[in-house]
C-alpha cells in the first residue's frame, strides 16, 4: 500500500499551539507527516533552524499520533520541490481566519503549478487559536505579556532563555 505522506511546511519560529492543533488534525489523514522547517536566513529568526527542529522533535511525542508517523526536517528553496523530493502527495496548511485565505490560495495555486501531482490540503485551526501567530507570540512575550496556553511550555521556556540572553 502506498504511504500517504504529507509535508507541513512553515517557519515555526517558534511552534505555537495553533501549529500543534493543525498537526493533530492532520494525523488521522496521513500515514506520515513531515514537519518541514524553512531555512530562510532573510527572516532574522529568533531561533535557529536546528533549535526549532529540536523543539518540535521534543514536543511531537506528547501528542496523539493516530498511527501517523511524524518526522521533523528542514529545507531551503521551494516547498513544492521539497515535497516532491520527499515523496509527499500533499502539502498541509492551516487556515485561521478568512484573512489567511488569499495568501494561502495564491501559494496553493503556485505550488500546484510547480508540482501538479501535489495537492494542498487546508485544515481549519480551532477558533481559540484563530489569532495566534509566531510573530504575535514573540512580540507579546518580549514585551512581558502572558502567552501560556498559546505556545507549548517548552517553547515558552526556550523563549525565556533566548530573551534573557539578548
Ligand atoms: O507558516 P509560514 O511561516 O508563513 O510558512 C510559509 C512557507 C514556509 C510555507 C512559505 O513561505 C514557503 O513555502 N516558502 C518556501 C519558498 C516557496 O516555496 N515559495 C513559493 C510558495 S508558492
Image: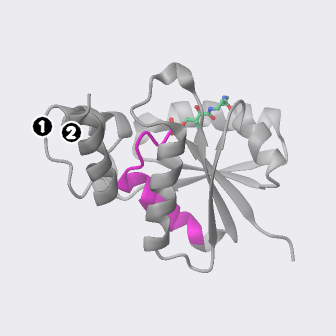
| Prevailing secondary structure class for the magenta stretch in the rendered image | helix
Q: Are marks 2 and 1 in contact (CB under 8 Å)?
A: yes
Instruction: Let me know if residue 13 is in the magenta part.
Output: yes
The residues colored magenta run 11-27
Q: Secondary structure at mark 1?
A: loop
Q: Is residue 38 left or right of residue 78?
A: left
Residue 43, x across and y down, in percent: 48, 23
The residue drawn where x is 43% and y is 72% is 62
Q: Nearer the viewer, residue 40 or 32?
A: 40
CA separation in Å, label 2 and label 1: 5 Å
Residue 51 numbered mark, or none: none
User: Where, by quadrant of the figure, is residue 144 drawn?
Assistant: top left
**Quarter placement of the N terminus:** bottom right
Q: Secondary structure at mark 2?
A: helix
Residue 89, x across and y down, in percent: 78, 55
Residue 141 numbered mark, or none: 2
Q: Is residue 131 visible?
A: no
Residue 152, x across and y down, in percent: 32, 58
Q: Nearer the viewer, residue 77 or 48?
A: 48
Q: Which residue is mark 1?
A: 144
The residue drawn where x is 48% and y is 76% is 64
Q: Is residue 20 left or right of residue 8?
A: left
Amino acid at each position: 500500500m502506498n504511504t500517504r505522506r504529507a509535508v507541513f511546511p512553515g517557519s515555526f519560529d517558534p511552534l505555537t499551539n495553533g501549529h500543534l492543533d493543525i498537526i493533530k488534525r492532520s494525523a488521522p489523514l496521513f500515514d506520515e507527516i513531515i514537519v518541514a522547517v524553512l531555512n530562510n536566513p532573510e527572516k532574522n529568526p529568533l531561533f535557529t533552524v536546528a533549535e526549532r527542529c529540536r523543539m518540535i522533535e521534543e514536543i511531537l511525542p506528547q501528542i496523539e499520533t493516530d498511527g501517523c508517523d511524524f518526522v521533523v526536517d528542514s529545507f531551503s528553496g521551494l516547498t513544492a520541490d521539497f515535497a516532491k523530493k520527499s515523496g509527499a502527495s500533499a502539502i498541509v496548511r492551516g487556515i485561521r481566519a478568512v484573512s489567511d485565505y488569499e495568501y494561502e490560495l495564491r501559494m496553493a495555486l503556485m505550488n500546484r503549478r510547480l508540482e501538479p501531482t501535489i495537492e494542498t490540503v487546508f485544515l481549519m485551526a480551532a477558533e481559540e487559536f484563530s489569532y495566534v501567530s509566531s510573530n504575535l507570540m514573540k512580540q507579546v512575550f518580549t514585551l512581558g505579556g502572558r502567552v501560556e496556553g498559546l505556545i507549548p511550555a517548552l517553547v515558552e521556556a526556550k523563549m525565556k532563555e533566548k530573551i534573557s540572553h539578548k
